[in-house]
Amino acid sequence: MLKKVILAIMLIFLVGCSKNIEDMSYEEIINDTIKEKINLDNVNAVGYKYYLPINFRLHKDDGFNQIFLSNNTFYYMNIDFVSYHYKSNIQSLHDINDYFYYNFNNSGKNGYLKITKNNDYFFVELCYNYAIIEVEVEEKDLKYAVSRSIMILDSIKYNDLVIEKYIVDTDLESAENVYSIPEPKDKNSSKNVLDYIKENDD
């Protein structure tokens, strides 16, 4: 375990020293991370495991939905077991109003980064490796959010036996996973997406 922690610190140190993420484009942040391939993990969940970076902590574990907390910001991760099991492509539509959109592929796994502006905040939707992370941040925190999110998604390793048994036992084959987040009906509202999530949870 100590060896894994040391390796993780070295990885972050080397990446941070070689390039400052603030000087990198979103494409460079994603491509450099998935090219390196993170072979570390420090969190075990049912059917998969992954690496949670420093300054992140697991706030809630709800099976294939995980909530992380970093710098007082919540990150929402959803695992798509069905798409992983059948190796299906996860699609997203690029909207003309998107602040930023990027499609990418690595070793047969496709992904996308979609950023939309919501009042004074930016909603980040990053999908890769049959999982998605959603977070809403200020503009100054966008590259931090993208870099840490792609690091988590790239590190996910699946347990095929557990996933197959789970799909058969719960008949997930007929289920449809929809990645969505509550949005205000009034787009000019001063509330951000996280306010609506909290209201829905309550």
Image (cartoon, grey):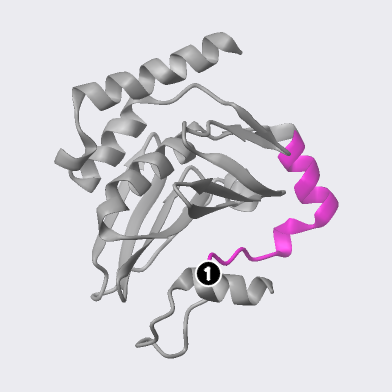
Q: Is residue 171 magenta?
A: yes
For the image shown, how many numbered marks are present on the structure?
1
x, y percent for residue 106: 36, 37
Q: Amino acid at mark 1?
A: Ser
Q: Is residue 180 left or right of residue 43?
A: left
Q: State whether residue 35 appears in this view.
A: yes
In this picture, is 127 found above or below 21? below
**Looking at the rendering, in which quadrant would you find the C terminus?**
bottom right
Crowdedness near tag 1: few (<14), some (14–19) or many (≥20) residues, C-alpha within 10 Å: few
Task: In this rendered view, identify the residue nearer to me: 164 or 192.
Answer: 192
The quarter of the picture where the N terminus appears is top right
Q: Which residue is mark 1?
A: 180
Helix, strand or loop at mark 1:
loop
State the predominant SS element of the stretch in magenta: helix
| Front residue of this view, candidates 49 and 142 | 142
Question: Relative to residue 162, is residue 115 depicted above or below?
Answer: below
Q: Is residue 22 above or below residue 171?
A: above
Q: Residue furthest top?
A: 3
Q: Residue at x 58, y 45 (%)?
A: 84
- Viewer-side residue, 54 vs 128: 54
Rendering coords of residue 164 (x, y %): 74, 41
Magenta span of residues? 162-179
Query: Is residue 65 rendered magenta in the image?
Result: no
Q: Residue 157 is drawn in which quadrant?
A: top right
Q: Is residue 90 visible?
A: no
Most extreme residue toward the bottom, as rendered?
186
Using the rendered view, name the quadrant where residue 21 is placed: top left
